[in-house]
Amino acid sequence: MIVYTGGTFDLFHAGHVNFLRQCSYYGVVIVALNTDEFIKRFKKKGPIMKYWEREEVLRGCKYVHDVIPNVSGEDSRPAILSVRPDCIIIGDDWKDKNYHKQMGFTKEWLKEEKINLIYVPYTKGISTTQIKERL
């Protein structure tokens, strides 16, 4: 099974590792990594680590098979279609948020493409924001 997930993965930490480990239980993990430009536009500030640094860290993670750039930003469909995944996996912290709108697709689009959306438990107590606060 091919698993698609995406994100910024800035200041790679134990929560990221736990999430990617959970993704790997479902199959081969392909990560769509947000570009620096998209992060600046979306979060109104850039990441601490540059794209190439975040990509290298992800490629070094044993749970990640490949990393692709999320070049279409808010519309994740081109990146998703380039992977042709069986499922998209996200943290369950998104359950009460409009993940579909955030990613630029609909439930109907996922159904047409035969892609399942799977939620896995979010790792509480660690986040990039919390690490930044420690500094």
Image: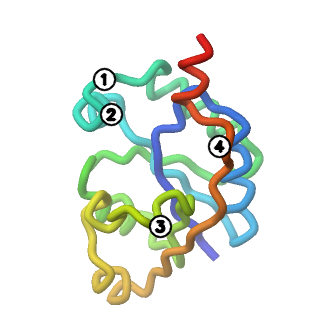
Q: Which residue is mark 3?
A: 95
Q: Earlier in the sequence, mark 4 or mark 3?
A: 4
Q: As shown in the figure, which amino acid type bears the numbered disc 3?
A: Lys
**Marks 3 and 2, how far apart at CA:** 22 Å
Q: Earlier in the sequence, mark 1 or mark 4?
A: 4
Tell us which disc is closer to us: 1 or 2: 1
Depicted 8 relative to depicted 109: above or below: above
Disc 3 is placed on an element classified as loop
Query: Do residues under tags 1 and 2 come within 8 Å of each other at their CB atoms?
Result: yes
Q: Which residue is mark 2?
A: 39
Q: Which residue is mark 1?
A: 45
Quarter in which the C terminus is drawn: top right
Residue at x 63% of width, y 31% of height: 12
Tell us which disc is closer to us: 3 or 2: 3
CA neighbours of label 2 inside 10 A, class few (<14), some (14 to 19), many (20+): some
Disc 2 is placed on an element classified as helix
Residue at x 25% of width, y 51% of height: 74
Q: Earlier in the sequence, mark 1 or mark 3?
A: 1
Q: Quadrant of residue 110?
A: bottom left
CA neighbours of label 3 inside 10 A, class few (<14), some (14 to 19), many (20+): few
Nearer the observer, 12 or 97: 97
Q: Which residue is mark 4?
A: 16
> Which x, y percent locates residue 87?
53, 75
> Which x, y percent locates residue 134?
62, 16
Q: Earlier in the sequence, mark 1 or mark 2?
A: 2
Disc 1 is placed on an element classified as loop
Residue at x 27% of width, y 70% of height: 105
